Amino acid sequence: MSLPNAPSQFSPRFVALLGFIAALGAVSMDMYLPSLPAVAEYLGTTAAAVQFTISGVLIGGALGQLLMGPLSDRYGRRRPALFGIALHVIASLACMVAPTIEVLIVMRMLQGIGNSAATVTAMAVIRDRLVGGPAARVLSRLMLVIGVAPLLAPTLGGLIAGFGGWRAVFAALALFGVVLGIAVYRLLPETLPPERRTSSGARSVLRGYRSVLRDREFMALALLPALGMSTILSYVSGAPFVLQLQFGLSPQQFALVFAANGLGGIVASQVNASLVHRFEPLAILRIAIPAVLALSAVFLLVAVTGAGGVAALLVALWLLMSSVMFTPANATALALSRHGERAGTAAAMLGALQAGMAGVVSPLVGVFGGDAVAMALVITAVLAVAFIVLAVATPAYRR
């Protein structure tokens, strides 16, 4: 079964399916977030160590995507997706019985490897059919589905943990994986016909990665969503400690704040889906990245001075987390458009950069103190690098 090569054929149901596939990693992190302080207490470890259970998912995802991308170019999109979802289920059950923080971190890495196959599949399916502005529109619509995770997953995770403890959250993640696997098996068509698949063998894989690594503009564009993801994950991993421990928000209040920020991201991604009808993705990035860098500076100023109290901090954080959503869809669409013949490999490189960079950067919030100032400093530094990459290594500001 294949899809017609037209944006209109990406029906709401099909986009929703791709969104849930791509959101598997986000759900794995967001549903678990309210349990971070409880895990630290139960396993007798530090906040920084527990944050590595978030980084473990990202690092596993980075490594997994480098493998799953070429496999999806060789064997099609369906089989790697089903394998990854099955691995997610197994790893979730292992996390549920993990006796120590070290075991939990390792199992979360395995969970990330499984999630990576789902992420690669969703991106590659879109690139199999679309490029440029149409791809950016579908990716923005995809963000609508992915954005549901921050709205519902922390609240649901908090409720599950309240009734069954933090281990019950991983049972719920395993169940989610089972349901998603059934949906993929029944509803996801194969979008890569056999005649377009790459040859097997390590040499072919290395040749594919060498091709994308040598493309400097692709690598620059791929760095932009990676830096955007690092911004988001620095917030995601630091927020439970900043908002609950530093500012005294209850788990319910934290879930509401997290949902509000997720809703802001959804709105921004849908505004972007409308803007790409009138403006090129690169033109949007030209304005969006400097704007979000300016907002991060405001957030840092509020965190350092304490001006306006927690209300001002939350407003600045909402504006920042909403605005950063203009970067991933546009930069991803531009990068993927350069390597349609190896969409899986290109998507894997994009995903690996995002997960790997976010996995390295986000723990820095805990390393630098785990408070609001540390979170703001890390975010501002990351966005400053994004602006430099945009200005120096892409045609955004060239005549």
Image (spheres, rainbow, N blue to C red):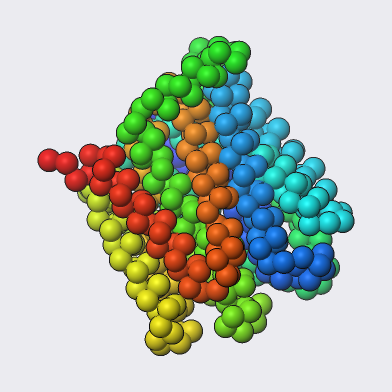
Q: Quadrant of the C terminus?
A: top left
Q: Is residue 151 visible?
A: no
Q: Residue visible at 70% across and 61% down? A: 50
Q: Residue visible at 72% across and 42% down? A: 110
369 lies left or right of 318: right
Q: Nearer the viewer, residue 318 or 1?
A: 318
Q: Position of residue 81 (x, y in %)?
A: 64, 34
Vertical relation: 317 (above or below) 105: below
Q: Nearer the viewer, residue 254 or 83?
A: 254
Specify the farthest residue to the left. 399
Q: Position of residue 359 (x, y in %)?
A: 58, 50
Q: How many marks?
A: 0
220 lies left or right of 81: left
Residue 35 picture quarter: bottom right
Q: Is residue 162 visible?
A: yes
267 lies left or right of 356: left
Residue 130 picture quarter: top left
Q: Nearer the viewer, residue 194 or 198?
A: 198
Q: Quadrant of the N terminus?
A: top right
Q: Position of residue 185 (x, y in %)?
A: 68, 34
Q: Residue visible at 26% across and 43% down? A: 392
Q: Residue visible at 65% across and 42% down? A: 60
Specify the farthest residue to the bottom. 308
Q: Position of residue 137 (x, y in %)?
A: 37, 45
